[in-house]
Amino acid sequence: MEKVVIIEGREIRLKVHGNIPNMYHAQFNEDLFMQIEKMHKTKNINLTLFNNFLWTCAKAADKDILPPDEWFASFESMPILHCLEEVKELFEKLFPQGKLKTKAQKATKR
């Protein structure tokens, strides 16, 4: 899925595909699934997670974007605040409802 969002007047292309979790881990040295699970457990929105996911989706759409620190610094405010709903939609495309549950969680519900 591809999408264009406007952040501070700039068109930013975003793309999700099956390699996003690996790209996220390679860049941020964190497991995307674990970060999402942690967010769900605490029931708090993790803006850093969403911001990093936003950058990863932008990188998937444009291999030539700046490294994260430089890219984030090119905005006046946190980019995610401008497009949280669109990024949540990308999350839902990448992780359809129920797909994040681990095998152990599924087994305990039987």
Image: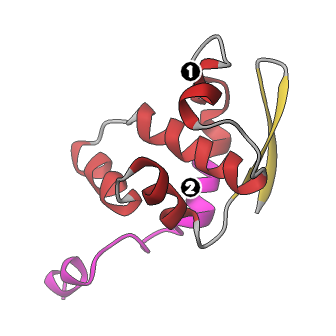
The quarter of the picture where residue 43 lies is: top left
Of helix, strand and loop, which one carries label 2?
A: helix
Label ID, residue 25: none
Q: Residue furthest top?
A: 76
Q: Which residue is tagged 2?
A: 91
Residue 84 in the figure: left or right of residue 86: left
Residue under the point 31% across and 36% down: 44
Q: Which residue is tagged 1?
A: 78
Residue under the point 59% across and 14% down: 77
Q: Position of residue 4 (x, y in %)?
A: 83, 43
Quadrant into which the N terminus falls: bottom right
| Amino acid carrying mark 1 in the image | Met
Where does the magenta region start and end? Answer: 88-110
Q: Position of residue 73 (x, y in %)?
A: 60, 19
In depth, the one of 28 and 82 nearer the eye is 28
| Amino acid carrying mark 2 in the image | Phe
In depth, the one of 19 and 1 nearer the eye is 19
Residue under the point 25% across and 82% down: 106
Q: Position of residue 14 (x, y in %)?
A: 74, 49
Q: Residue furthest left?
A: 108
Disc 1 or 2, which lies upstream in sequence? 1
Quadrant into which the C terminus falls: bottom left
